[in-house]
Each structure stands twice: as C-alpha cells, then as structure tokens.
Amino acid sequence: MNNRIDSHQHFWKFDPVRDSWIDESMSKIQRDFLPEDLLPLLKENKFSGCVAVQASQSEHETHFLADLASKNDFIKGIVGWVDLRADNISDRLRHFSSNKTIKGFRHVVQGEADDFMFREDFRNGISALKEFDFTYDILIFHRQLPAAISLVKDFPNQKFVIDHIAKPDIKSGIIDSWKSGIEEIAKYNNVWCKVSGMVTEADWKNWKPEDLKPYLDVIFENFPTDKILYGSDWPVLNVASDYNEVVKTLEDYISKFSIEDQNKIWFENAVSFYNLNQ
C-alpha cells in the first residue's frame, strides 16, 4: 500500500513567544519544522501526502501554510485559522475560499473556557463555514466533549472531525467519562475522528502500545471505519515517540482489518473528508 495521507501534522518556524505552549518539557520540538523535514518520513512510511494543520491562531498562519503548500505538492490540504467570532467572518471565508488548498479551519478550543463552543459569536462563525464547503477540526480536552456534542448536534450539515480522539487522559488510564462522550458524539453522521495525538496524552517516557489499546478499542467500536482518519501529529509526537513508531503502532492495531478498511483509514477517509485533490 503506497497511498496514504497523514491527515494531521504541523509546520512552524519556531518563535519562543508565539509558540510559548512549547515549553522546556518539550525542548525536542523547540526548533523549526518545515516540509523538507517531513518529506523523507512520509516517503519512508508510504505516504503520498499530508494535511497541514494550524498551530498558531492568526491569519498569518493560514497564509504561511498556504505558501508552503504552493511550493510542495505533497501538502494536499490545509486546516487554517480564521477568527470565527469576527463580525466579518463571511468576508474572511470568501477571501480564503479562493485558495483551493485551504480545506477547513480550526480553533484551539482546548485553551478556552469549557463553555466556549456555546458562544453565540463562535457559533455564528461555524454557521458560515458550510456555504464555502469548509470543514471544522474540533480540538478539545475530553472534559469539553459535552459542548462538542451540542455543537455537532446543532449543525447537522457541517462536517466535523475530532482531533486527537478528544484527548483522553491516557497517562492516568482514566477512561469512563471520555468513553461515554465518544459513544454519544459518534452517533452523529456529520462527525469523523482522527486517530492522532495519542502518544502525547500517554506517559511520554514509558508508554507502550497496550496503553493505547483500550482507547483505540473505544474509537473503533463506535466510529465506522469510513469515519476514522490517521494523523501523526508530527512534530509534536517527537516529545514522546518518533514518526515510524507511531505509524507502526496503528499498523499493528489494524493489521487484522480488511485491506479495504485499512485503505479507508490510511487514505480514502482523509481524501473524502477534506476533498483532497490527488
């Protein structure tokens, strides 16, 4: 299988002020990560392309990613940032819709108050996405799942994907409230889920594949295989693992699945969700 899409990774030119979330405990990623750093890893692991996702909250970030995509054809799509709370949100979305590499948007909701997704101005922005066929990536901690469930329920025609399986507390092994939230949100036909970002929710130095298995079981028991996407979360994964190990962990987990289902998870679902050009 030589056709795979990494549906979730980041690029940045490291700025210690803007990127203050990358603290000293994450010193391994306190440097630049650009397309030339990722391409060999993609090739080695049989990926034909990737989706670059915003890491900082500015329109400058969206333009930065769009510029990289214009120079690197393996960047198949971009999930940018725009202020969804802005009064002129439709104008900004119209502006970005002229760039066909920009497939959707994301806000770092995990850094906001737990009621953020109930805000009228934020929901106004979400309501504007559909006109331009933009997707929305849901980045939350597991405690924010009730708000996310309300959001996807109230916007049934909007395509949503949950990043990093909604960040359960894998390190502690706590699973119940996250599991019940996943069981509920997976019922909605407009919701996909990325198997991504798991190793950084585990014990960075001591995690083992079996630590991830109960959480993967919940995802695969609740989401159909045509709603699950693979994402590496490179380069953030480097604080706890490396690219090849993260790929192999999922390869091993889905090795007994049909080739058809494996192809959906590695490739087809990313293409269809983000409407990627091949």
Image (cartoon, rainbow, N blue to C red):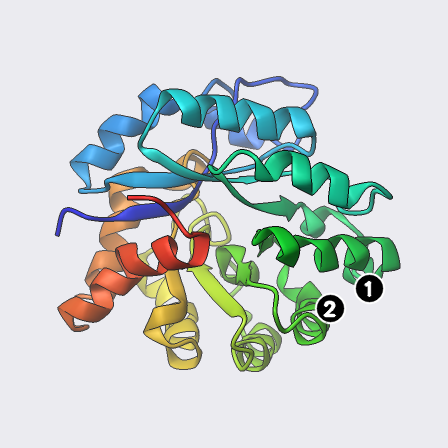
For badge 1, the amino acid type reads Phe
From the top left corner, tell me how far across and down residue 254 is, in percent: 23, 67
Residue 1 visible in image: yes
Give above or below for 21 relative to 129. above
Q: Nearer the viewer, residue 268 or 146?
A: 268
For badge 2, the amino acid type reads Ala
- Alpha carbon distance from label 2 to label 1: 7 Å
Residue 23 visible in image: no
Q: Nearer the viewer, residue 98 or 102?
A: 98
From the top left corner, tell me how far across and down residue 270 is, in percent: 37, 54
Under circle 1, the secondary element is helix
How crowded pointer 1 is (Cα within 10 Å; few <14, some 14-19, many 20+) is rated as few
Pointer 2 residue: 147
Do callouts 2 and 1 mark residues in contact (Cβ within 8 Å)? yes
Q: Residue at coordinates 48% horizontally, 66% vertically from top-left?
A: 192
Give above or below for 119 relative to 47. below
Q: Residue at coordinates 63% horizontally, 73% vertically from top-left?
A: 156
Q: Nearer the viewer, residue 103 or 192?
A: 103
How crowded pointer 2 is (Cα within 10 Å; few <14, some 14-19, many 20+) is rated as some
Q: Earlier in the sequence, mark 2 or mark 1?
A: 1
From the top left corner, tell me how far across and down residue 131 is, in percent: 64, 55
Q: Quadrant of residue 259?
A: bottom left
Q: Which mark is residue 118?
A: 1
